[in-house]
Amino acid sequence: MPVFRVRKEPFDWITTGKKNTELRKGKARKGDYATFLSGKRKLVKVKIVRKQEGSLGELLNTYTFNSIVPTARNLDEAIEYIKRFYPSLEGTFTAYEIGTRSKKQINSPNVSHTRKEETENGKQHPS
């Protein structure tokens, strides 16, 4: 199961249903569910409905930009937001379309196993 570390704003977008596509650089991770971690105790587990790999341009043509960056008013703003976190927009990205019905927020006092797994799988990402 992929574990994604996100900042507070994207975490809130996910838990409120404003964001339904998570974009990550690299090939798709295995699993039908994803866990999003924000801060020390905020976790949310969601169903992955679909995964798609491709270039950033291909994925932005497939998914509406505001399903990835809900505050973006246009495609250029979405790209600028993404550029803040990835030094290069070249290469493979993966879009994880997440279900809106299966979100389960967990305020867990023990997330050490999740942090360890997240560290092994990659760095914190803001969106």
Image (cartoon, rainbow, N blue to C red):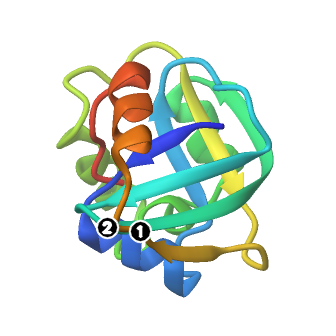
**Of callouts 1 and 2, the N-terminal one:** 2
For the residue labelled by badge 1, is the local secondary structure a helix, a strand or a loop? Answer: loop
From the top left corner, tell me how far across and down residue 68 is, in percent: 50, 59
Q: Which residue is mark 2?
A: 41
* Amino acid under disc 2: Arg
Q: Is residue 96 above or below residue 118?
A: below
From the top left corner, tell me how far across and down residue 55 is, in percent: 56, 23
How crowded pointer 2 is (Cα within 10 Å; few <14, some 14-19, many 20+) is rated as some
Dividing the picture into quadrants, the one containing residue 76 is bottom left
Tell me the tag on residue 89. Answer: none
For the residue labelled by badge 2, is the local secondary structure a helix, a strand or a loop? Answer: loop
Horizontally, residue 20 falls left or right of residue 125, namely: right
Horizontally, residue 119 falls left or right of residue 104, namely: left
The residue positioned 67% from the left and 62% from the top of the image is 46
From the top left corner, tell me how far across and down residue 87 is, in percent: 19, 24
In the picture as drawn, the residue positioned furthest to the top comes out as: 91
Q: Is residue 108 above or below residue 56?
A: below
* Quadrant including the C terminus: bottom left
* Amino acid under disc 1: Ser
Label 1–label 2 contact, CB within 8 A = yes
Dividing the picture into quadrants, the one containing residue 109 is bottom left
* Quadrant including the N terminus: top right
The residue positioned 65% from the left and 25% from the top of the image is 28
In the foreground, 114 or 35:
114
Q: Is residue 114 above or below residue 123?
A: below
In the foreground, 16 or 115:
115
Q: Which residue is mark 1?
A: 108
In the picture as drawn, the residue positioned furthest to the bottom comes out as: 16
In the foreground, 59 or 33:
33
Horizontally, residue 51 falls left or right of residue 117, namely: right
Total of numbered circles in the picture? 2
Q: How far apart, in angstroms, are the residues tagged by discs 1 and 2?
A: 5 Å
